[in-house]
Amino acid sequence: MLIFGGVYSNLQSLEQMQALARTHGIPPDRILCTGDIVGYCAQPLETVRAVIDWGIQSIAGNVEIQLREGETDCGCDFNAGGRCDLFSRQWYPYAQSCMDQVALAWMKTLPDFIRFEWERRQCTVVHGSYFETSEYVFQSTPWPVKAANFAAAHCDLILAGHCGLPFHHHEEGLSWINPGVIGMPANDGTPRVWYLLMEPGSEPQFRHLSYSYDHLTAARLMRETRLPQPYALTLETGLWDNCEILPEAETAAQGRKIAMDI
């Protein structure tokens, strides 16, 4: 299975993800998205249409929920008055103005969770957490916070999105795995983006993998559309404009190239 999240209206990255799925030989019915197909970048409607045509499974991210409900903000739970909040007042209205009725109707079909059994493990796909779509859960988030989600969801493997960083946390026979996002880099000083492969076998494996794509075109389109310029720069540098949403441990890791092996 192939899992990714946070396409963020980045059509160039999505197209590369589709090519990689074909290379891996993984059909659409074994591909999952953790939500936020729409976001910061320049081609929201084209990205939604590409996901619909691809035929993969996805849950609703907070952006899809807000768009389908006609809300006036992205629902990302950014710090009020912070830079992310300020930038969202630019990209969210732009994305909202690009939507059509077909896209919005499709968003209304997206579930809040996907549950399935894989290699004798009970899996739940969430966006932020089981309790709150826009909750930020990171590698450094205390284990008891994560453990409460497993108990409520009655599962032993959670695949989550929203926080923008790939990580895995295994304790007590339980696994919280975030595949990362493909629409923005992971704040590690490279323009790479991240996804996850789940491979069956006598000892099932979870592999965090990264890839490069035509990020220069994605950044150029953001500038031409007059979307937040710091986010266009992030596509090029691999560094987030700010660390407002990040805990201390993740803030300290900014610019440190990620090496994943699980």
Image: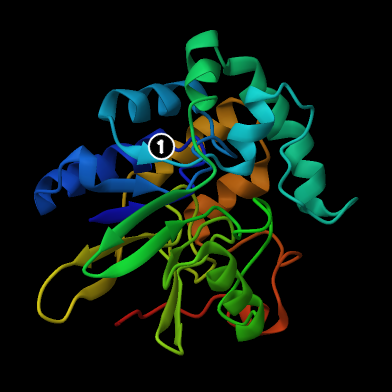
Q: Is residue 214 above or below residue 220?
A: below
9 vs 89, left or right, is left
Residue 60 seen in the current view: yes
Question: Where is 262 relative to 180, above or below?
Answer: below
Task: Identify the residue at horizontal 36%, vertical 65% (top origin).
Answer: 122
Observer-nearest residue: 87 or 178?
178
Give the camera-side residue of 48 and 220. 48
Judge from the rendering whether residue 60 lies leftward or rightward of residue 156; answer left or right.
Answer: right
Which quadrant holds the C terminus? bottom left
Residue bearing mark 1:
217
Image quadrant for the N terminus? bottom left
Name the image quarter holding residue 246.
bottom right
User: As shown in the figure, which amino acid type bears the numbered disc 1?
Assistant: Thr
Q: Write the residue at 54% across / 9% down.
A: 101
Residue 7 in picture, x, y percent from top left: 46, 43
Q: In the rendering, at what x and y percent does residue 154 appear?
A: 49, 66
Secondary element at image label 1:
helix
Q: Residues within 10 Å of mark 1 (few under 14, many from 20)?
A: some
Q: Residue at x 65, y 83 (%)?
A: 144
Depicted 132 relative to depicted 63: above or below: below
Q: Residue furthest top?
A: 101
Question: Residue 57's spot in the image, x, y percent?
Answer: 35, 39
Q: Residue furthest right?
A: 81
Is residue 92 or residue 25 the one in the foreground? 25
**Would you say residue 211 is visible in this rendering?**
no
